[in-house]
Image (cartoon, coloured by chain):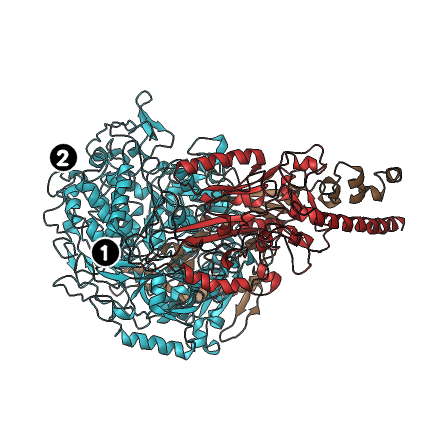
Chain colours: A cyan, B red, C brown
Amino acid sequence: MGSNMAEAHPVGFQWVMEAKGRGARVIHIDPRFTRTSAVADTYVPIRAGSDIAFLGGVIRYVLDNDLDFREYVAAYTNGSFLVREDFADTEDLDGLFSGYDPGTGTYERDSWLYEGTEPSGDDDGARAKTLSEPFQAGASGAGVGGADRAERDPTLQHPRCVFQILKRHFARYTPEMVERVCGTPREQFLDVCRAWTDHSNRDRTTALVYSVGWTQHSVGAQYIRAGAILQLLLGNIGRPGGGVFALRGHASIQGSTDIPTLFNLLPGYLAMPSVEHTDLDTWLADQRTGGHKGYGYDVDAYMVSLLKEYFGDAATPENDFGFDWLPRISGDHGTYRTVMDMIDGKVSGYFVLGQNPAVGSAHGKLQRLGMANLDWLVVRDLNEIETATFWRDSPEIETGEIVPERCRTEVFLMPAASHVEKEGTFTQTQRMLQWRTKAVEPSGDRRSELWFAYHLGRLVRARLAGSTQERDQPMLNLAWDYATEGEGEWVEPSADDVLRRINGHDLTTGELLPDYLGLKADGSTSCGCWIYSGVYAEGVNQAARRKPHTEQGPYDAEWGWTWPSNRRVLYNRASADPEGRPWSERKKLVWWDADERAWTGHDIPDFPRTTPPGHQPPDGATGPEALSGDDAFIMQPDGKAWLFAPHGLLDGPLPTHYEPHESPVRNPLYRQQGNPTRKVYGRPDNPSNPAPPESGSDVFPYVLTAARLTEHHTAGGMSRQLPYLSELQPALFVEVSPELARERGLTHLGDAHVVTSRAAVQARVVVTDRLAPLRVDGRVVHQVWLPYHFGHTGLVSGDVVNDLFGVVEDSNVFIQESKVATCDVRPGPRPRGPALRALLDEVRAAAGITVATGTRIATAHDVRHTEETS
Amino acid sequence: MSRLYGPLDDVAGDAGHVEHPPRVGFFTDTSVCIGCKACEVACKEWNAVPSRNENDGAGLDLLGMSFDNTGMLGADSWRHVAFVEQPRRTGHQEPGFAGLPTGPSGIPETAGAVEPRLQEAPRGGSELGTNPLPTGAPEPQELRPTENLGMPGFSRPGDLTGAESRTDFRWLMASDVCKHCTHAGCLDVCPTGALFRTEFGTVVVQQDICNGCGYCVSGCPYGVIDRRQHDGRANKCTLCYDRLGDGLEPACAKACPTDSIQFGELDELRERADRRLAQLHDLGVSEARLYGRDPDDGVGGDGAFFLLLDEPEVYGLPPDPHVPTRDAPAMWKRAGQAAAAFLLAGLAAFVAGGRR
Amino acid sequence: MRTWLGSIGASTPLGSWPVYRQLTGTDRLGRGAAAQSPQHVGLRPRTASADRVAGSVCPYCAVGCAQKVYVRDEQVVQIEGDPDSPISRGRLCPKGSASLQLVTGPQRLDKVRYRAPYATEWTELDLHEAMEMIADRVVAARERGWQERDAQGRRLNRTVGLAALGGATLDNEENYLLKKLFTAMGAIQIENQARI
């Protein structure tokens, strides 16, 4: 679901085909019949943006028919935990949970906590919403103080236990409701329910695959939560053949999150300090609101070791290891907010490194207008991309919104070294780091980003040398002494040395650390990214290992290196029962070896190695020592997987079906139409199409979705310039069903334009039986699809599909909703120049769009939304 | 005496290779093809085959034939992935459209929009395969226009009649390639010796010899081989002859993510294909069939053969290909006379050159 | 005729002439061994003559398919899948298969391009000069956007004058240095495709 794996990840899909060849049943649930559907056993149509209703329906089917893996649920999830009496569900509050504040569009979340636990200080949902705080919980878990004191009912019968709350929450997600919301015929839905539950037990597991078809929604984090809840209920987490697979779309996008360039994170999912953190201790206290249990508790060691890597000898206990040198965040500094700040004249300079936001980010026009209002822009890429040439050939040149002679942005376009012209690691989608050796030297001005970062740092440090200003001290004390190769001023920094420092050192001996368990909070270790510690264990670049798969076991432990500690299956303690025995011989992965008094198995056990299954921690234990023998979810403050999230998420402890920000229909489940906490930006340059209960939605009657083709890559910078790829998909097209083609007079291979309140995009019409209308809540809903790879440079070009989308985000992680919107489709080419602006003015007027459209996000009964959203 | 048609156990030996490796080929199992086109790109990268836009300058355009923008095999497309959208289903596969508020299929309309464009296509692909060379052989059965152009069809005749809404659907994908026939029409009619049978039993054009006469183009019963526009020389799949020499598999087969394209010794591939066919039949995919597997067919069996899920015409493949020499002793006599004349002229030139 | 041809012998130029070999050898129809041109005898793939092979990873999606990069005379001559990989088993998709074109194609930028304010065309700029100019601008933008404390007097210690957006095809080591550098400069609007 939410993934077109055969097209977007063809080589990974070989394993699906192999499983199918061995008898596995493959089901593809998607708005369109794709190349994945073509080889699946079953294709199931769904309306884009309704997946939680579908998954909620499956959850209800499981619970209603007692098909959950009860022993697993009771032992490893929080199903038995009791929730506070003052918790109120969406069933009680018309689509809202208890604690909603319409003034901020957020929740005060204390009522979601377990019975018997205390609130973790000031729960400030509004603050959390400005910081994308849930994203920061990766290293230390979401906060639930005193979770071990939570009241539990192991029989799962107490009306306030999570298991029963779950039952009530999804009680109305019946097959009939699924059909009404998703447009999926109920028989097909029930077929999926039966397949999923028939193949989830001691002997069988079911794998769930998703991609950005799930994440790029205003309720995206809850899509994944819904999938996780279902897989937990069925015992499909931590077991071979089970799992929730996030297929990521760029060579090192997993690495870019682990070692982030993200505003609210430091390496290893450590939270970027915010303005409330006056010193290291206040920061630590904030991270440890999760309680005392699990590996997250050792966050002090992770942070201090990072500061030791950042500032070297200058980081001392006396100066809090340089904590005060870190900048503080105080609100939304995400990429979309920053682009709006550019338009508003608040940003001088912008680095775009291997990225093409003029095409690849939502609302391309906003991106381009932002770049046109900078002092300077540095673009580093392999090829000349649209982001570098916005001042010359963007669509706004034609409409007169950007005039080259009046655009002051100074642009540096710098050639980058390719993946074979530098060495380093990518982290692939299953957390595996793989080292690339350099094949050839880059020619001309081509350089690695490592070279660029290293020398930029060197040059800026030189300019600040001798400064006594406080603000310059972090730069001057920065450990920037990486090993280099070559002679003279413009040497090449050593990626190998950087990787060693990411792995970390014991500073008392100078030895490389074997793994993160050795990290200390006293400043005696350094480590650039705690979850990557061990990648250079024993002085060997573990990521460079390439032992052929034909010469090793099924988990291929000696190919590359997977964080953490080279574990291939996360939470694999759950592959054994509470007593430490495999659930079945067939699904054996790790188990307790009573003779050795240690965990062992085919994979590296994801559990303290010598903690026995029946272990009960002593009072006062902290960190990993506080884990019980059946606390399989070792990063959680209560050691349990969360069917219900008592903290950590901003938009609710349970996933709930909300309509997308732009939808042609009223939410059939609640009067609360959309996610009541979604992040909206009500600005004249970011209009929304109206959605019920607002009027005017009929101007944009169709559901719009966009995705990839196999033959191109993301924003096209690495594919539209290549002859062999361009000829395979030479033009932008829009897929429509024959029914919609007849309704709108669209002809196969003719021109059409897709219209939203942001843009009109011209595309060739492809009429195909692979798309079909759906019946949603009694009306016929058409969906249209376009590939988003096209732009105005390259061998093949076309309008920018992302121009059609506006900026509205999931409040947890600030990912934009670019997988679903509403649109109109009209035959013929779009107007050009001033006529295009006139068309957009006309549709906005027809739909009655103002800056307030789409911003009144609370629509439940008796709630009036008053949040400031610009 | 070497045979010109019918089964032939040792094609390489028949072509004078005394001690030679086993015959190799491709088995393309289209039932696991995901239409990714890795084969097309890997082939071009390895063999430096020009992209179409840099060759003919005609620019690139959508063909409108589902996701196929290559169209057919040719001098600059040695692999071609066909995409066929059909209103029928495969075995127990559930296409998912039942119960939706659909109207009639759009396939007739799309086929109608594409057909005139196909008529303008520079080369008619399998028309060459379904129509025999002018040797007096009987005319083949007339085919519908959408099916005889060497490009994949959209549907079979009769599939669409009477349907008011659409429930059955499938999307077929298949990677086509030179068949490396046991009796290769291109090779039989090549007057210059540019085409030759390798020790692996494959058929290769030698660019250093080809003079661009084009006989091979009309000699191919599948419409595979074609002349490149800029120099007129004939080009087609070599089954990566250079790679075979080093024990490597051809680039397309190596890249293929789902092993739809399988390379190996032909005998072993045939056994594997028979097993796969039986497996699919057991799974209820009764329409699965092998194409080019049979040594008794009109080309003596293909070195590259296929598992298809429908009639070959649906994929743009001729239903009953046969080597032109089978029914054409007269033509062969003409070719023989031409070759004799060429031999004399060539000998004179060669001897003259040698004396210089 | 046989005698005459036989007297020419295999060592003469005529001996390599296909028709001669056809008439004297095992390939009487001249369609196999006899027709083979000297260039095609013992043909070897270009990978066999590579000076070295570098182990790499495909730069497109996140499956992480292993690649072998063949280098001859300091030029990349072929990129294909590494069959040893437990992830990809030597296979590549069309994008991965186009890696050679990605790396060696004429679309690659080779020189720094510079667009001055209000200019309508690119001009060339020396790489090192560009680096010095960028460093100057970074220092100035950092200063211009500096925020010492917020309205409540709380420490901010940051600049909002600088922003960055990184692609997810950068190496971990590169992202590490970028985040470290920008953080030390006080820049906070440092974002990545991973958000998108």
Q: Mark 1: give few (<14), some (14-19) or many (20+) Cα within 10 Å.
A: many
Residue drawn 73% across the image and 51% down it = B208
Q: Which mark is residue A181?
A: 1
Q: Chain of mark 1?
A: A
Counting every numbered tag in the picture gives 2
Q: Amino acid at mark 2?
A: Thr
- Considering every residue shown, the one lying at the far top of the view is A595
Q: Secondary structure at mark 2?
A: loop
Work out whether residue A257 or residue A548 is closer to the camera in this orientation and state it.
A548
Residue A381: percent from the left, percent from the top?
Answer: 50, 59
Left of A507 or right of it: where is A684?
A: left
- Give the CA separation, mark 1 to mark 2: 33 Å
In this picture, is A777 found above or below C52?
A: below
Residue C186: percent from the left, percent from the top?
Answer: 38, 59
Q: If you read the primary sequence from the N terminus, does the residue marked by circle 1 or circle 2 appear first?
A: 2
In this picture, is C6 found above or below A580?
A: below
Q: Secondary structure at mark 1?
A: helix
Work out whether residue C43 or residue C88 is closer to the camera in this orientation and state it.
C43
Residue A239: percent from the left, percent from the top?
Answer: 32, 35
Quadrant occupied by the N terminus of chain B: top right
Residue mark closest to the camera, 1 vs 2 = 1
Q: Chain of mark 2?
A: A
The answer to whether residue A500 is seen in the rendering is no
User: What residue does disc 2 label?
Assistant: A155
Work out whether residue A585 or residue A20 is closer to the camera in this orientation and state it.
A20
The answer to whether residue B188 is seen in the rendering is yes
Q: Amino acid at mark 1?
A: Val
Q: Are marks 1 and 2 on the same chain?
A: yes
In this picture, is A113 found above or below B275?
A: below
Q: Which mark is residue B261?
A: none
